[in-house]
Image: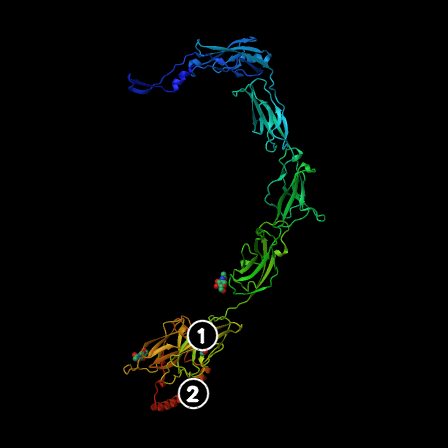
Amino acid sequence: MIPAWLWLLCFSIPQVTLETEDGHVLWGPQPVLVHVKDENDQVPHFSQAISRVQLSQGTRPGIPFLFLEASDEDEPGTANSDLRFHILNQAPAQPFPDMFQLEPRLGALALSPKGSTSLDQTLEGPYRLLVQVKDMGDQASGHQATATIDVFIVENTWLPLDPVHLAENLKVPYPHHISQVHWSGGDVHYHLESQPPGPFDVDAEGKLYVTMELDRETQAEYLLQVWAQNTHGEDYTEPLELQVVVMDENDNVPVCSPRDPPISIPELSPPGTKVTRLLAEDMDAPGSPNSHVVYRLLSPEPKETEGRAFELDSTSGSVTLGALPFHAGQNILLQVLAVDLGGAEGGLSSTCEVTVTITDINDHAPEFITSQIEPISLPEDTKPGTLVATLMATDADLDPTFRLMNFAIEAGNVDGTFGLDWEPDSGHVQLRLLKNLSFETAPSHKLVVVVQSVAEMVGPGPSPGATATVTVLVERVLPPPKLDQESYEASIPVSTPAGSLLLTIQPLDPMSSPLRFSLVNDSEGWLCIKEVSGEVHTARPLQGAQPGDMYTVLVEAQDADEPTLSTFVTLVIHFLKAHSAPAPTLALVPTRHLCTPRKNHGVVVSGPSEDVDLADGHGPYSFALGLNPTVQRDWHIQAFNGSHAYLTLALHWVEPREYLVPVIINHNAQMWQLLVRVIVCRCNVEGQCMRKVGRMKGMPTKLSAVGILVGTLLAIGIFLILIFTHLTLARKKDLDQPVDSVPLKAAV
Ligand SMILES: *[C@@H]1O[C@H](CO)[C@@H](O)[C@H](O)[C@H]1NC(C)=O
Ligand SMILES: *[C@@H]1O[C@H](CO)[C@@H](O)[C@H](O)[C@H]1NC(C)=O
Ligand SMILES: *[C@@H]1O[C@H](CO)[C@@H](O)[C@H](O)[C@H]1NC(C)=O
């Protein structure tokens, strides 16, 4: 203990000065720190000389049930105030002398392990303990004090608790007392824990409370643990457990599962088909009436006459189809009441809703709108690819995939002459011609077209409307007559006399049926055509025609057997300059012979004058064949000197007969036409004409003798005529001698 004046000294800091006798300060003032040293002059003492304490049986050894308190006024932290507690004596010393233990520094009094076991068996005591407190720590010296502690042993009241049943939603004032615990030892603190955490509490007296309403659906059971603890929070013994059971009340409505997606049921499903199973959940205690849910069908309401659309099992909630039929595309709202308490009065309920959609099935076969189509006429020359007919079909199903159709020609499509064309999702099909028609092979076609659903059909088979019959009649088309040229041309002088043959129009195929020719628009009337042979002549003198002009007429060639078939061809006439002289008369020259097949022979054709006077400006003659194409085809002419030309066969083989070959000779704007009579005969071995061998000369028969006689007389007659004619001509020649009147000559 530090005396009061010293404390004062310590905290009012003194100052030191050095002064002379006359009061002069030589040094200072300077503060001086004075340390006062503690001395163990104080005695420790207990806060209570006698303590009474209750000790419960069952207290665990080593758990302090009393904390001794003592104080020492010496300086804290020094050995002078360092206190130690000891038990000096235990009375009675039964059954053991060391029933207790005292922690020397803390003064915590507890049962020793030995004491704990004996205390549980017999109820001893009370015990009187003499305890000492001493300073100077563990040193032998020091001041000391003593105290007496009476320890009363009490019965263990820390007994197991019965479970508590608590109704949920209990309407009482809270906190609501539910149970009680009691630790009979002294200095007890109760501590409560709830598993899972819940609204429970314990007070200092060990009364247990629930502090608010419970909800079974949140937590149906709690396990509470209560501990008895000393002032330091150490457990005297094991905790007591209390089970709290929350009792159910019908406070939950059956709840339907959230609105399900619509349920699809195929149309035509039989009664009894499972539709769905409704499940309403009730949160109340399982197995109790509070959660016993039954079902009632609210909608659609059953109709007395037609029967039920749906059947509902009230217990299981399963819904099946009733007898009432549905049709595809129907949407039905199914409303079912779910009631708890097994449907008893006062039960809670809610309405469950499910939409049922009746889906389509492919139960309708596609059908043609018209199955009998008017006969269709097609000309024989109709081009492949031509649309013949469009057929329409329908399908009564709703689902687009069930409305998809396939088409096929089931019968009558010989050689694939026809084909079908359709868009997959359209109801119409196009019948097209794929190949050339032929009236000869098939004058008509009877096609049977079938339509089928692409998707597999359910139910009835194909209907009679699934086929359509198309009759195609082939119209005969005959080709128009063909001619040997695409167009015809002729060049003639404007002075060409009437009746001149210009050319011949012929069929391409001589074996084809005969043709009838006519001029369509010979507006000038210059021409005429032989109806059968096709020879075109000038009909009259070409008055008004100008050299260099062209005259085009259309010629019609009709099939003689089939007058509707005809061909038109143009005939172009080019007009040339007129001859200065009158048109040449056609001169017949002596008959020649040529044999066929062609040999290296020809006929020499001479111009009108043997000696061409080249010197006096007169050019050579030019030779050409007549314009008749047949002549041009069969014959060939080539000039070999100024006045002569060589006529040969152009073809290897020409039919043996008599020919009149028109040869046109031009000279100085003059023109002559010469008809060379050539007899074509078969060649003999020598390559000459094979003539009929007559009888040997000099061996005349009687008949030939008469013939010779007549012939001789005839010759004399002719001779006389010639002389006369010659005389006449000679006289005439003297008057005027036109060039073209010179007799034409030709020689073999
Ligand atoms: C069909 O006819 C046309 C004209 O008539 C012809 O050009 C074509 O070659 C023919 N096709 C067949 C495959 O006969
Ligand atoms: C005759 O008809 C053809 C074709 O139409 C035409 O080119 C020609 O000029 C016509 N001829 C006459 C003389 O009208
Ligand atoms: C042309 O040939 C023929 C026959 O060979 C002959 O008679 C004639 O004199 C010839 N004319 C000329 C101008 O050479």
Query: Percent x, y for residue 641?
Result: 31, 77
Which residue was labeled with disc 2?
A: 713
Disc nearer the start of the sequence (1/2): 1
The circle drawn on residue 305 is none
In this picture, is 155 found above or below 383? above
Which corner quadrant of the image does residue 713 belong to?
bottom left
* Ligand 2 in which quarter: bottom left
Q: Is residue 442 visible?
A: yes
The circle drawn on residue 570 is 1
- The amino acid at mark 1 is Thr
Q: Nearer the viewer, residue 653 or 226?
A: 226
Query: Percent x, y for residue 546?
Result: 39, 81
Query: Percent x, y for residue 659?
Result: 42, 77
What separation in Å lies between label 1 and label 2 (alpha carbons)?
A: 56 Å
In the rendered image, the residue lying farthest to the right is 305
Task: Determine the secondary structure under disc 2.
Answer: helix
Q: Nearer the viewer, residue 141 or 532?
A: 141
| Mark 2 sits near ligand 3, with its Cβ under 8 Å away | no
